[in-house]
Image (cartoon, grey):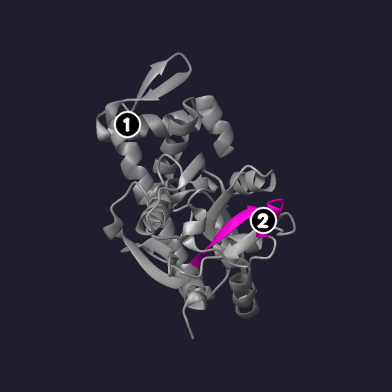
Amino acid sequence: MDIRQLSYFLVIAKEEQITRAAKALNMEQPPLSRQLKLMEQELGVTLFDRNGKQMKLTPAGESLQRRAESLLHYFNETINEVKDIENGLQGTLSIGSVFSCISLIPQKIGDFREKYPRVHFKILEGDHYTLGEYLENRSIELVITRLPFESNYDPGKYSVLPLPSDPFVVVMPRQWEAYNAQTSLPMKGLADMPLLALKSDKTIRLHERIVDECRRFGFEPNTICECSSVAIIIALVVAGIGATILPKSVMSSFPISEIRMLDLPDTSFQSEVGIVWLKNRYLSKSAQALIDTFRPL
């Protein structure tokens, strides 16, 4: 059994049909069926339950699928590592980011591409859990994110480069005219304000930190709506529904003509930011160079 056969097997498992798999692989059906039969004969197991044209993995097939995916990831990483040594920095670098950190990326990519113009980028956006899966299946090599990184996996498997902390600000509707003359707001000024919270069923740490800071000043936040998306929160702020507390850098991604942003001068409350990647896994030279671009001079 070889890498080519494992690749065929994974496509069949994905398509659940020999005909579709052969089409996806741009090959004829009989040779593909023959390769699958050779694999089953060599292993002495049945990899698929066949029901007409439909094919479902057996328990043995599911086990092979997990192992084959890992083996092919390592195989591809090895190829990429060898190419890096020979060719230097080129190709495509895939990275991920939570939406609230997108504003940190453009300047760094600009700086990076001045040095390495042959490297192209693919950027995926998502929450911590989605980005954790992307890291695990090697769809991306690193993530720019708020810390701590709340994925489904053991935090000990990640390397983290902390970036400069980001102060929190109050973002409120422009039509709240009572605040026209203000550029800042004490924490206790939030006590009776209708607040919109950035929170999902899985990523809650940022929200918990904001609640804890409010309690430190002796009040419970008046949260009227929880949202999983920064974009939704800003839309609600623009509509005059409520205010929100967000890291200051987030606001550089939005026009501020319809909103008001006030500092919180009586708190040192900060949002921690960092770059996250998998320990003990190959990291391309391009990824290493991008991480170095974020390191303080």
Mark sitting earlier along the chain (1/2): 1
Asked if the magenta segment contains residue 132, the reply would be no
Q: Quadrant of residue 100?
A: bottom right
Residue positioned most to the front: 178
Q: Position of residue 239 (x, y in %)?
A: 69, 43
Task: Spot the residue most to the left.
Answer: 44
Q: Position of residue 196 (x, y in %)?
A: 54, 45
Residue 29 left/right relative to 207 = right
**Is the residue marked by circle 2 packed among few (<14), some (14-19), or many (20+) residues within 10 Å?**
few
Q: Residues within 10 Å of mark 1 (few under 14, many from 20)?
A: many
In front: 283, or 18?
283
Residue under label 1, please give it. 61
> Does residue 64 appear in this view?
yes
Q: Please tell me whether residue 27 is drawn above or below residue 77 in the rendered image.
A: above
* Residue designated by label 2: 178
Given residues 38 and 248, the one toward you in this image is 248
Element under disc 1: helix
Report the side of 73 relative to 64 (left or right): right
Instruction: Read off the magenta span.
Output: 167-179
Relative height, residue 249 to residue 201 (above, below): below
The spot of residue 177 in percent (x, y) is 70, 54
| Residue at screen point 52% across, 77% down | 293
